[in-house]
Structures are given as structure tokens and as C-alpha cells.
């Protein structure tokens, strides 16, 4: 324990300590989560009743686009990078991340990337309005001039992700404590290792896509313009070659978190550890060869359509293995239901539901009806929010005592869980009905038969939004005035190196590597 | 706590169960159900849409049964293996047999689903031997239908008023799903749709026809439908295409073969009359009046009713160089559009009368005072002179 943190703002600006950087990532991503959430509230308020009440359709499109971009790139991804920064060194017995200065850089370019993106809201022409999937030519020929800010924002965010991933890979492969073999790694570490490889593989593809847009818009090329010999559908292939692995990038670390929490509160080792590792690898591999299932209505040749249908259906197998393993871990355990466990169980229930609708979407002929309808919106919020965001909430409650040395208020935690759980389902179950009934997604206004369920959905969304403010309150009040919780092992059933450290974890940990038997 | 667990079980399963029960109920209900009862996919009125519905329900039921087992085991553990009930944790943590079992069984279920899916998909892709060909062209934000080989084509646009959208007028039954002119199709005939777009990607979706296909600029996609029952079927644009995305509905009027023949003959006559009209002359006042009406329908969406456009997105026409400059350039921009921008080529979308009136209006409205006018015959000559 050579020295403590620096004093003043310099501690954060020049941070190289994995815990400080992790903390900054977590706070930054939560700020982005609130911003993206505010956009969602505007969307749901406008959709509360038919007719345009609050905003204009052009601004509505900016809101749906910014909501998606901010949530995916600003909230969920950086939050898991923050979690990795905090937990990977602690879980593998490393003193810090392998590349601490790059760690600083990868965090500190993020606020600039998002400032660039968000600044378009105040410019003439407005923010990006072409959806978070930014299909050409709506995002090229027909985009507002501010699209160039969006493109550079995405480049910066992508560079940050790539650096963060390289750091995580380098840390896991090089800094494991003696005796910590690969097949002893905690699952959170495993899922992040695989996620990091996915990120390094696909973020450059996204960078390529936006660069081609930049060329089309400013330098007269025609990658995505049929009039110049290009192809708008090419954009979708490139985007989804990035985009499908991207959704697993979001969900795999969440699986890792669940695989930590469930054994702890079941007081029983994780069932099928090695099959979990293989299933995660299988999901990662499949993620590269199924992208065009997002494009079943683009008029692909039937051979392509059939191939992508079969390949996509296969994903259900390794995903099913994971769910079965979690449930078998709980089976004949000794269960308690603290807040992290509630979130973990909710993830298993709701993510499985999102998996079912995912299987439905994989069936190409049926997807002809589901595609680009609210059914899809319901589906991906079940996997993105109930999968990734719920597990992130669970992770914060789970490790907060280790980070702060203080215990959150269990009653408040449980209350927050139940409001989030009920609000979430009220918000998103009706969206499945709306989609099946024929309501397309990204609609600023809708026909009257869709009024009832839209109203219900909006009420649920407001409830879920309120739960996040309560979450913020819970975290702050724990830090400020939580009951001290200084024992090393916060949870009775917890396993792993992080629980051999004092709480709160000191500024420098594992300066001498632990011995893993 | 027990009651909470029970509640949870019911709560977790209810969406799926509800979905399936409603699927059964929906069979009995008519096609224009609304509000709370809208829960499941329509069975539709074509062979393909029925097949899709059956496939959908098969997968829903598979999911229901899997979820009964999976959630059942889970809730049983949550109830029976609680620490508060004195449960002691076992230590088992692997079993190759079990792992293999729950890998193989899902694979078999998936193969079972893959067979009918493949059959339906192949059917859905078979656009051969069509009786009628309709070219569907997506525009920001309307559809154009062309009856290939018949010389009949028209634009189909939303008729819901701006006032109704902004809540200044009450909303009528078919709010946002009504158009000036529906696509008329005969029942019992195989109709092939050839889809394309003039600007961005749109998607033509009519749930009851079981048809959704992207309309991609520069490419032609094919799909088909054979409608079994006469009726009016409504659909929407399903690919984000800009600010008017929610405001370009689709209405299909399926009629008997005889009615269709009568309608088509009348349309052909009207088309001939329209061509005649282009040769007449109009007074300045007539052109301005007609121009205001056509401008508000076709141009005001971007350039605004007051001609001021939307700053940063769509240029103002009030005081613009094109509107105040030589008439040839003005004609060129309106008829051919401006490459690389959102300005469409309206030459093929609007009649010569409309084009002449709009150009005259743009040159003389909102304080623009060029003072000249454009006759339909000028537009015709401009087009032919190209």
C-alpha cells in the first residue's frame, strides 16, 4: 500500500487506478442512463394518447434516435466497462488493469464523444433523426447536416470501447494470480473476456460503416446510393454485422453478473460451470453468422433467408443451456431473496420471456408480420432492459458494500425492485400486443385502435422511470449514510477473491498476488 | 411470502397464456376489433397470412409449454428451497447427462419448427404466374400505385387533417389510416407487388394480407397476395422514412372481379381526360387557387405552408433564388428534383396541371412577386424537351 489517492480534481483527471476509473465509468453511464431515460419519458408522454400533443414528429424521431444511441452506447456499454474495471482485477487477484494509462484515455474521451453527439440537439437541423440503426439513405442523402457530428461521436465512442476491450483482454490473459487458471475464472470474467473479443472484432466494422456514410455525404462517393452504383441494403448488412454481435456485447456481461449472484444467494456452486463457458463462446460465435435476421423483409434471396432463419434458431440452444443452468443452481439450494437476488431472478424470468419472443422472431415467415412492429420493441426491451439493465442494478446492490464499506437499506432496495419490475412489465408487455395488432415502431402518432395499450405502456414507463430515481437515491444514501458493513464477506454464500478483501476495498489491492488453490 | 410467490407465477405466465387464449377468441371476432381486445396477430384474408398465423400460434404454444416447465421448476425451488424454510444447500454442480439432454431436446424442437417455417417461406417467395402486377412506389410520405400494362397510376395519400392530428378537430374512426384513393384489387386473383422507392427506404405492410416488404430506392422487390374475402384492409409504412413515417397509411379495397373490371375501365377513362386537361390554359387566379391547394398537399410537408421551410433541414421558398429566378430552373427543380438532397422529382408524381399551378403559386405567394405564370402546356413541353 504505497500511497493513497491524489488530492482534488487531479485524482480523477489523471486517474490510473482501476477503482477510480471504474467509479467514473459507473457514474458517467448512470448520468447517460438518466438522459436516455428522459428521452424515453418524452416519447412515452407523446404516445400517451393519439394526436401530437407535446412535440412535433421531426423532434419525435430525434428522441427515438437519441434514446437508442444514448442507452446502447452511453448507458449500458460503459456501465459494464465500469463494472469490469472494478471487478476484473479483484476477481482475478490482479493489482490493477494491465494498461492503466490507456484506461484513463478510454474513459476520458467518452464525455467528449457524447458531448459531440448531444450538442446536435441545440443545432440547426436538430439531432440525428434516422433511428439508432441509421439506415442509409435516410442517414446520408436525407440527413440533417448535424449527421457529421454524430459520425465523429460514434468514432470516438468506438475508439473508447476498443481501448477498454484491449485493456480487459490484456488484464485477464496476463495478470491472473498464481493458480488462477482459465477454467477457474469467475464467470463474470469469462463473459467479459469473450465480450471484449467481440468488441474488438466489430467496433471497427461500425467505424467503417459511419466512415462510408461520411464519404457519401461529403466526398461524393455512392456506397449506399443506388443512383451511383451503390446499394442501400449494403448499409444494413454492414450495420448488422456490427449490430448483432453488439446485442451480445450488451447481454454477455449481464449473464456473467447473474452467474455470480445466483450461486451466492442459493449458497450452492454454479451448476455446469464449464458448459456455461462453452455456451457463452457458442453464443459469441453464432452472433457473427446471424446478422441478416434483422433484414428478413429486405428481399434477400430465399437461400439467404432460410440460412439466416436456421442459424438464428440455433442461438436458442446455448441460451437455453444458460437458463437451465441458473435454474438448476437454484434447485435444492438454500435461497434467500436480498435485492441483488431479486434482480437476478427477474433477469432469468424476463430475459427468458425475451428469448421466447426472440425465437418467434427467428421464424422468418412469421417475422414478416412482426418485423419493425412494436412487437420487436417489446422483444428487445425485454432483453436489453430486463436482461442488461436489471442485472446492472443487481450488480450495484451486490457489490456496493464492497465498494463503499456500507450497506444499502434492504427495504428501500426491495421497494425499488418491485416498482421497477411491475413498471417494466406494464410498460413492455402491451407493446407486444400493439405490434401483433399492427402498430409499426418509431411512430410519432397512431391510429385509434392502438390508444388503450399505448396509454398502459406509458403509465408503466413512467413507473419504471420513477424507480430509477429511487435507485439513485438508494445509492447516494448508502454512500452518505449507509450502515457500515466492513466484514470481508458481505454475503454468506459469496465465493471469490473479491470477498477476501476488506470492505471498502482499499485503494490498492493484491499488490502481493494471492495464491489460488 | 407464499402468496407473493403465487402471484409471481401467475404474473409471469399470464402474458403468454393471455396471448394464446386471445388467439382462440380472436378467431370468432371480426377483423375490425379494437382497443383492449387487440392482443394477437390477425389471421388475415390470404393463404399466406393464415399459414403465418398458424406458425405463430405453434411457436407461441411451444413457448408456453417450455415456460410452464422452466418457470415451474424455478418457482418450485423458490418456494421449497428457501433458507427460511430450513432448506440446506446441496453441493451438486455438474451432470453431463443433464447437460446433453437439455441441448438435444431444444434442437429437436427447433427442427420440428423449421419444417413448416421452410414450407411457408418457400410459398411466400413464389411470385410466379401472377394475374395482376402492381408497382408500388414509396415516396416521402405517400404511396404510388401503378397498374402495369393498364396505363393507370395514382398517388395514395393520407386524408386525415393536420387539425385532427394536432387535436384541433375531433378524430374520426379511421384517423391516420384513411387515404384519398385506396389500392383496388380483385379477390381470388394472384396479385404480384413490385416494390421500390424514390427517396428513402419504406416498407409496405398490410397485416391482413400477410405482406410486408421493403421498398428500396434503386431496387425492385417482389411479393404477392391472393385475397380470399372482399373488404377494406388497412396497413402502414413499416420502415422509418423521416418525419412523415407515421402519416403514410395503406388502404386496400378488395372487391369482386366484376367490380374491379368496372373500376379499372373508369380509371382508364379518367386518365385519358387528365391528359386532355394538360392542353388547356388557365387564368392566373385559377392557377394560384389550384396551386395553393396542391402546394399544401404535396410541398408544405417540408417547405411549410408559409413557404419558410424548416431551418437546417428544408430550405425556405419565400425569397429563394429558385422561386424568384428564371422559370426554366424552377421547372427543372420541381420536375426533376435535386440530386443528393431530399428534393424529390415531382415530374412523375403530379399532373401537369398540378405542377404548373404549384410553380405559379411558389413564384407569387408569401411576398414572392415574380408576376409570371406557368401553364400546363409549358410543363409538358419542358418534360418533352428533355
Image (cartoon, rainbow, N blue to C red):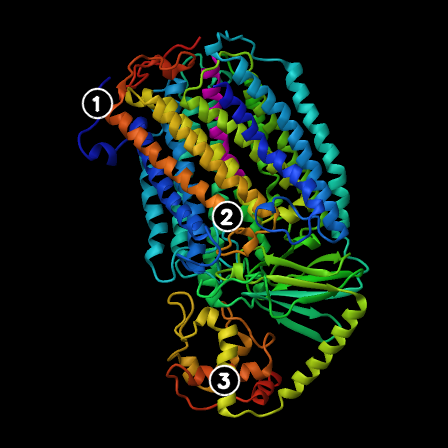
| Circle 2 SS class | helix
Q: Quadrant of residue A57?
A: bottom left
Instruction: Same chain for labels 2 and 1? Say yes or no.
Output: yes
Tell me where the magenta segment starts and ends, as one range.
A245-267
Chain letter, disc 1 residue: A
In the orientation shown, which residue stands out farthest toward the left?
A7
SS assignment for the magenta stretch, majority: helix
Q: Which residue is mark 2?
A: A454
User: Is-magenta flag for residue A89?
Assistant: no
User: Which structural element holds mark 3?
Assistant: helix
- Judging by the rendered image, the residue that carries numbered circle 3 is B289
Could you say whether the residue bearing mark 1 is in a helix, strand or loop?
loop
Q: Is residue A448 above or below residue B359?
A: above
| Cα distance in 3D space between marks 1 and 3 | 79 Å
In front of the other: B329 or B172: B172
The answer to whether mark 1 and mark 3 are in CB contact below 8 A is no
Q: Is residue A319 left or right of residue A396?
A: right
Amino acid at each position: 500500500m504505497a500511497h493513497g489517492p491524489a488530492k482534488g480534481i487531479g485524482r480523477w483527471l489523471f486517474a490510473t487506478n482501476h477503482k477510480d476509473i471504474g467509479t467514473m465509468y459507473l457514474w458517467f453511464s448512470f448520468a447517460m442512463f438518466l438522459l436516455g431515460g428522459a428521452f424515453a419519458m418524452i416519447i412515452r408522454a407523446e404516445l400517451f394518447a393519439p394526436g401530437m400533443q407535446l412535440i412535433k414528429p421531426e423532434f419525435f424521431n430525434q428522441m427515438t434516435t437519441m434514446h437508442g444511441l444514448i442507452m446502447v452506447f452511453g448507458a449500458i456499454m460503459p456501465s459494464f466497462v465500469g463494472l469490469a474495471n472494478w471487478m476484473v482485477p479483484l476477481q482475478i487477484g490482479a493489482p490493477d488493469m494491465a494498461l492503466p494509462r490507456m484506461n484513463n484515455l478510454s474513459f476520458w474521451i467518452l464525455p467528449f464523444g457524447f458531448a459531440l453527439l448531444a450538442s446536435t440537439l441545440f443545432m440547426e437541423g436538430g439531432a440525428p433523426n434516422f433511428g439508432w440503426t441509421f439506415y442509409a439513405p435516410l442517414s446520408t442523402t436525407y440527413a440533417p447536416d448535424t449527421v457529421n457530428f454524430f459520425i465523429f461521436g460514434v468514432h470516438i465512442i468506438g475508439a473508447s470501447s476498443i481501448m477498454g476491450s484491449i485493456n480487459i483482454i490484456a488484464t485477464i490473459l496476463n495478470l491472473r494470480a498464481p493458480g488462477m487458471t482459465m477454467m477457474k475464472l469467475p464467470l463474470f470474467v469469462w463473459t467479459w473476456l469473450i465480450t471484449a473479443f467481440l468488441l474488438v472484432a466489430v467496433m471497427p466494422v461500425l467505424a467503417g460503416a459511419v466512415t462510408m456514410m461520411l464519404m457519401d455525404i461529403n466526398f461524393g462517393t455512392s456506397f449506399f446510393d443506388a443512383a451511383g452504383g451503390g446499394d442501400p441494403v449494403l448499409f444494413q448488412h454492414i450495420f448488422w454485422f456490427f449490430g448483432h454481435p453488439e446485442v451480445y456485447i450488451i447481454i454477455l456481461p449481464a449473464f456473467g453478473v447473474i452467474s455470480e449472484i445466483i450461486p451466492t444467494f442459493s449458497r450452492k456452486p454454479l451448476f455446469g460451470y464449464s458448459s456455461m463457458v462453452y455456451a457463452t463462446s457458442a453464443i459469441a460465435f453464432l452472433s457473427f453468422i446471424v446478422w441478416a435476421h434483422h433484414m428478413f423483409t429486405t428481399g434477400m434471396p430465399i437461400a439467404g433467408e432460410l440460412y439466416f432463419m436456421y442459424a438464428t434458431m440455433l442461438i436458442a440452444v446455448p441460451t437455453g443451456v444458460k437458463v437451465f443452468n441458473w435454474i438448476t443452481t437454484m434447485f435444492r439450494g438454500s435461497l434467500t431473496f436480498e435485492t441483488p437476488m431479486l434482480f437476478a431472478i427477474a433477469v432469468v424470468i424476463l430475459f427468458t420471456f425475451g428469448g421466447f419472443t426472440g425465437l418467434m422472431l427467428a421464424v422468418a415467415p412469421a417475422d414478416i408480420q412482426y418485423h419493425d412492429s412494436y412487437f420487436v420493441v417489446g422483444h428487445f426491451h425485454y432483453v436489453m432492459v430486463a436482461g442488461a439493465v436489471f442485472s446492472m442494478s443487481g450488480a450495484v446492490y451486490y457489490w456496493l458494500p464492497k465498494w463503499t464499506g456500507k450497506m444499502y437499506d434492504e427495504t428501500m432496495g426491495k421497494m425499488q425492485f418491485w416498482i421497477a419490475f411491475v413498471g417494466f412489465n406494464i410498460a413492455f408487455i402491451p407493446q407486444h400486443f400493439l405490434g401483433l395488432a399492427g402498430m409499426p415502431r418509431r411512430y410519432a402518432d397512431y391510429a385509434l385502435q392502438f390508444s388503450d395499450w399505448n396509454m398502459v405502456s406509458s403509465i408503466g414507463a413512467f413507473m419504471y422511470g420513477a424507480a430509477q430515481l429511487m435507485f439513485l437515491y438508494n445509492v447516494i444514501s448508502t454512500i452518505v449514510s449507509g450502515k457500515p458493513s466492513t466484514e470481508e464477506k458481505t454475503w454468506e454464500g459469496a465465493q471469490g477473491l473479491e470477498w477476501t478483501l476488506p470492505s471498502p476495498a482499499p485503494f490498492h489491492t493484491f499488490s502481493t498476488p494471492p495464491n489460488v488453490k | 411470502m407464499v402468496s407473493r410467490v403465487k402471484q409471481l407465477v401467475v404474473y409471469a405466465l399470464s402474458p403468454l397464456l393471455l396471448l394464446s387464449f386471445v388467439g382462440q377468441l380472436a378467431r370468432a371476432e371480426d377483423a375490425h376489433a379494437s382497443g383492449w381486445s387487440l392482443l394477437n396477430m390477425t389471421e388475415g384474408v390470404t393463404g399466406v397470412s393464415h399459414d403465418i398465423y398458424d406458425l405463430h400460434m405453434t411457436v407461441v404454444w411451444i413457448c408456453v409449454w417450455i415456460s410452464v416447465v422452466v418457470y415451474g421448476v424455478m418457482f418450485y425451488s423458490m418456494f421449497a428451497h428457501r433458507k427460511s424454510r430450513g432448506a440446506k444447500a446441496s453441493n451438486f454442480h455438474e451432470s453431463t447427462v443433464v447437460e446433453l439432454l437439455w441441448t438435444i431436446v431444444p434442437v429437436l424442437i427447433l427442427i420440428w419448427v423449421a419444417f413448416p417455417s421452410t414450407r411457408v417461406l418457400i410459398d411466400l417467395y413464389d411470385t410466379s404466374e401472377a394475374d395482376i402486377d402492381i408497382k408500388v412506389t414509396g415516396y416521402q410520405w405517400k404511396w404510388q400505385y401503378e397498374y402495369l400494362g393498364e396505363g393507370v397510376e395514382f398517388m395514395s395519400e393520407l386524408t386525415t387533417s393536420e387539425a385532427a392530428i394536432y387535436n384541433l378537430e375531433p378524430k374520426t374512426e379511421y384517423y391516420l389510416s384513411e387515404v384519398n384513393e385506396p389500392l383496388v384489387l380483385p379477390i381470388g386473383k394472384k396479385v404480384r407487388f413490385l416494390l421500390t422507392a424514390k427517396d428513402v427506404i419504406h416498407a409496405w405492410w398490410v397485416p391482413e394480407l400477410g405482406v410486408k416488404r421493403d421498398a428500396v430506392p434503386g431496387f425492385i422487390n417482389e411479393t404477392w397476395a391472393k385475397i380470399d374475402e372482399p373488404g377494406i384492409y388497412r396497413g402502414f409504412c413499416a420502415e422509418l422514412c423521416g418525419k412523415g413515417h407515421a402519416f403514410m397509411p395503406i388502404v386496400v379495397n378488395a372487391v369482386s372481379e366484376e367490380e374491379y373490371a368496372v373500376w379499372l375501365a373508369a380509371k382508364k377513362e379518367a386518365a385519358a381526360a387528365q391528359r386532355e386537361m394538360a392542353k388547356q390554359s388557365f387564368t392566373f387566379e385559377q392557377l394560384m387557387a389550384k396551386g395553393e391547394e396542391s402546394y399544401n398537399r404535396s410541398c408544405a410537408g417540408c417547405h411549410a405552408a408559409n413557404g419558410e421551410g424548416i431551418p437546417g433541414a428544408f430550405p425556405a421558398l419565400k425569397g429563394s433564388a429558385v422561386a424568384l429566378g428564371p422559370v426554366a430552373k424552377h421547372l427543372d427543380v420541381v420536375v426533376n428534383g435535386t440530386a443528393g438532397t431530399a428534393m424529390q422529382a415531382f415530374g412523375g408524381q403530379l399532373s401537369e396541371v398540378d405542377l404548373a399551378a404549384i410553380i405559379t403559386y411558389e413564384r407569387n405567394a408569401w411576398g414572392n412577386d415574380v408576376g409570371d405564370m406557368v401553364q400546363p402546356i409549358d410543363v409538358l413541353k419542358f418534360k418533352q424537351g428533355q
